[in-house]
Amino acid sequence: MEFLLYLGGIVFMLIGLGLSIGLHEVGHLVPAKLFGVRVGQYMIGFGPRLWSKRIGETEYGFKLLPLGGFISMSGMYPSSKDSGPASGAFRTLIQDARSANDETIAEGAEDRVFYKLPVWKRVIVMLGGPLMNLLLAVVIFTVLVSGIGVQQGTTTVAAVNECVVPASSTATECGADDPESPAAAADVQPGDVLVSIDGKPVSTFAEATAIVQASPGEPLALVVRRDGTERTLTLTPIAAERTLTDASGQPVLDDDGEPVVKEVGYAGMIAQMGYVQQPLTAGPQLAADTVARVGSLIVTLPVRLWDVGVSLVTGGERDPNGPLSVVGVGRLAGEVAATDAPVLNRFAVLLGLLGSLNVALFVFNLIPLLPLDGGHIVVALWEGVKRAWAKLFRRPPPTPVDATKLVPLTVVVATLLIAMGALLLVADLFNPVKLLG
């Protein structure tokens, strides 16, 4: 059964990845067709063709390796007749790229090419793919935090401490000299639902905790709902050193990663954990926060890849926040699915992984290097700058930017991407990140 659950997690992530890639390519396909560009192929995957069907002028299909996708637009670069002769040490490579590009330009459709589009339309076509992934991430995160909710302390009391012991104590039972906890003294009972404290309504346990921590030694009117009836109790928090916690009950850490301990008001109530639905703005905010984290990872990618290589050779523990291959993400999904946690908890984690994967696709594809989408955007913007400069100084319009001259750089980038993928794949097979330890 555990194996089937593990396999189910992998299948879930593979389907999610396929959907993400498919929608990414739709983000390119739709504006390209709207702007009149001839699109020859729409393919999910690479390698040998598994299935395809031609609809109109476009062939739609799937290929064997689900590691990406592409659409084949006519005339991504200027045709050979519009470009000067290739020169330099890489002229053969450049000429091959031009010949391959010429083959995409159908006879009679010479004007339905990508490179002849206005700059703003080219930018929209290339931005469409990454933006589709960002939109999908926002939808996933909104379903996650506003539909399912965020697991945190609810207003229902799960347990009441009988006494107060020092934060540093390891005692599991009350001693004869330990004072009674304020919550026990106020007759708070497990199952009570907190309604208000000190006249302030509370909707989460975090809100109640904040009031208690700010009021050591002050009698507070505590309204609870017990057996369908509201009761007013008097709670007087005591001053005690306690580890500060966030809304989800996790310890707040300082800059050194150590739990923050502070003298605050203490009551001795323990919250019942549950999913609390967040406002609809929380999904986009979570997506924005994830974009910032992934962007930081991309900036430090060379260092992180080095660390992955070192851990692979030495057998050291991988950074759980480091880069992963598709295999690594699949293994994490299988590990989550095979736990004995409640089904909703596992589904929430899998959704979070899928949302983060789409953010990664969004950020990574915007790297301003060919053959990534960001590289094509930079080429289009550079042509726009050249046209604006010529117009400003009343010069003839410049010729289209011939990006085939960047093919040597593109090959280097593609080689590095393949090497990175191979390193992460090997690392995820032989020294994987273990999300659950």
Image (tube, rainbow, N blue to C red):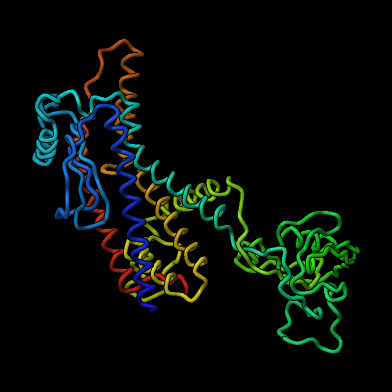
Q: Is residue 236 left or right of residue 421?
A: right
- Residue sitting farthest toward the front: 228
Identify the residue at image location x=37%, y=43%.
Answer: 130
Residue 8 vs residue 255, the one in the foreground: 8
Name above or below for residue 417 compared with residue 30.
below
Q: Is residue 379 left or right of residue 353?
A: left
Number of marks present in the image shown: 0
Percent across and percent down for residue 113 are: 20, 28
Percent across and percent down for residue 141 are: 50, 52
Name above or below for residue 282 compared with residue 324.
above
Percent across and percent down for residue 133 are: 39, 46
Q: Quadrant of the N terminus?
A: bottom left
Identify the residue at image location x=38%, y=65%.
Answer: 307
Identify the residue at image location x=78%, y=69%.
Answer: 227
Percent across and percent down for residue 351 are: 46, 58
- Residue sitting farthest toward the top: 394
For residue 27, which quarter of the picture? top left
For residue 317, which quarter of the picture? bottom left
Q: Is residue 39 left or right of residue 190?
A: left
For residue 204, which quarter of the picture? bottom right
Identify the residue at image location x=33%, y=61%.
Answer: 325
Name above or below for residue 245 compared with residue 81.
below
